[in-house]
Amino acid sequence: MPTPADPPWARGLPVRRHAGRDDARDLAHRVGAALAHRAGADPATEPRGAPRGPGGAPTEHVPLPRVTGRVLAEDVEAACAVPHYVSSAMDGYAVRGPGPWELVGGDSPSAPSGPDAPVPLPSAASAVALAPGTAVPVVTGGVIPEGTTSVVREEFSCRSGSIVRLAPGAPPSELEGRHIRATGTECQVHEVLFHAGRVLSPADAAFAAVAGLDHLPVRRAPRVALLLTGSEVRTSGVPAPGLVRDAFSMSVPHAVTAYGGVPGTVHRVHDDPASLSTAFREVCAEHDVVLTTGGTSRSGVDHVRPMLERETRVLVDQLDLQPGHPALLGAARRSAVLALPGNPLAALVVVLLVGGPLLAGFSGRAAPGLVPVTVGVDAAGGRREKLVPARRRGDAWEPCRAVGPNMLRGLSEAEGLLSIPRAGLVPGDRSVVLPLPW
């Protein structure tokens, strides 16, 4: 039988004791994908008969107003042709033949006026079948009657009693089958609109709607718990010396959402090993991903690291970069665990660098990409690669001020995290930036 520290879903994953930037991102993405496969096969978390996407990942059907940013779980077909009926592209008259034409239905397209005037319906002409030499008013989007050979725009028509003629000076092209929208010009019924794996946009949702759909099958978003440790942490006001404000509950959940996760309740635990273990097991049972804060160093008062060494298979023991060096990535029985350092900037760097790919892997998306940039100032290197808050200055990037692991001002002014290699950078050097998700 596997122990809690030997979950079957993680057995094929490598261990990176000292993971560099790219190794950590790649492994986190693989962990997310493996975790999604496990979640889709787990009757304890997915109802019997629940839909599954490629690789067994859990899926759900979501109303169109909520699909933007989600990953499509399977190919989707149109429920109807688009357009689904022959319609007019202009206000005017549907006519048959070269004219003049006798008006056989309704008034002119612009006749209704005033608050009590009847509103013409797009289907008003649908009951009419045009005989040669006849016409009927139509509005933009209105149904084209059977037998129509063209739509004459209202501004190129003239009417005398019940007779409609082409206005003097009207272009002859008005009689060449113009302004008629045929069915299926955008798609046919049962045509594939989108393929599995697509990250859906607002335009996709709109197109799905006009193709007759109400819901789309998407990969289930990972459920993410935030477990905050630290007896010294306060949630409001100005803390006394030796105490600190919580900087995570208002920042980490938004990053989780930006990367496609669903943040759960924030859990707060004092620095007590027994309480921490109990809370950890509870949140692991209910969430796909658990983010912890603090306690990842190796002192006698750091309880998260020894707990994860007991309760999980540690896949990343530390990161070969600063800030964020003491972070861990582990695999529990039903969840992945990303243990963040206690320093605010260090923790948020790890969320952005490792948490983003982890959640993307679960959702079936590509990991957030690194962007090549030019550096505009000198940037000192160090023992490890640095990822520092940075922003654009013209065509180049430069680090922000206040970028120590315990500082947040730099991140609040930043547009991305700039990679500074051990050798440092000079103006004109090329590097990469991880854009911020907010």
Image (cartoon, grey):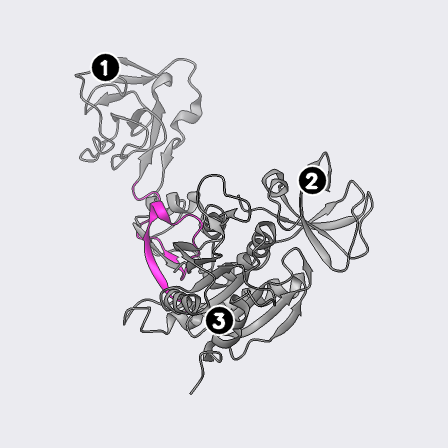
- 380 inside magenta stretch: no
Q: Which residue is mark 3?
A: 34
Q: Which residue is mark 1?
A: 113
Predominant secondary structure, magenta span? loop
Against 20, residue 85 (above or below) is above
- Image coordinates of residue 355 in percent, x first then y, are 53, 58
Q: Is residue 427 left or right of residue 331?
A: right
Q: How many marks?
A: 3
The answer, for residue 374, to whether it is visible in the render is yes
Question: What is the number of the mark on residue 401?
Answer: 2
**Residue at the image position 79 percent from the left and 41 percent from the top:** 377
Q: Amino acid at mark 1?
A: Ser
**Is label 3 in contact with label 1 (beta carbons under 8 Å)?**
no
**Residue at the image position 28 percent from the left and 18 percent from the top:** 110
SS at badge 1: loop
Inter-mark Cα distance, 3 to 1: 63 Å
- Image coordinates of residue 218 in percent, x first then y, are 39, 58
SS at badge 2: loop
Q: Amino acid at mark 3?
A: Ala
- Span colored in magenta: 56-85
**Residue at the image position 52 percent from the left and 63 percent from the top:** 338
SS at badge 3: helix
Q: Nearer the viewer, mark 3 or mark 1?
A: 3
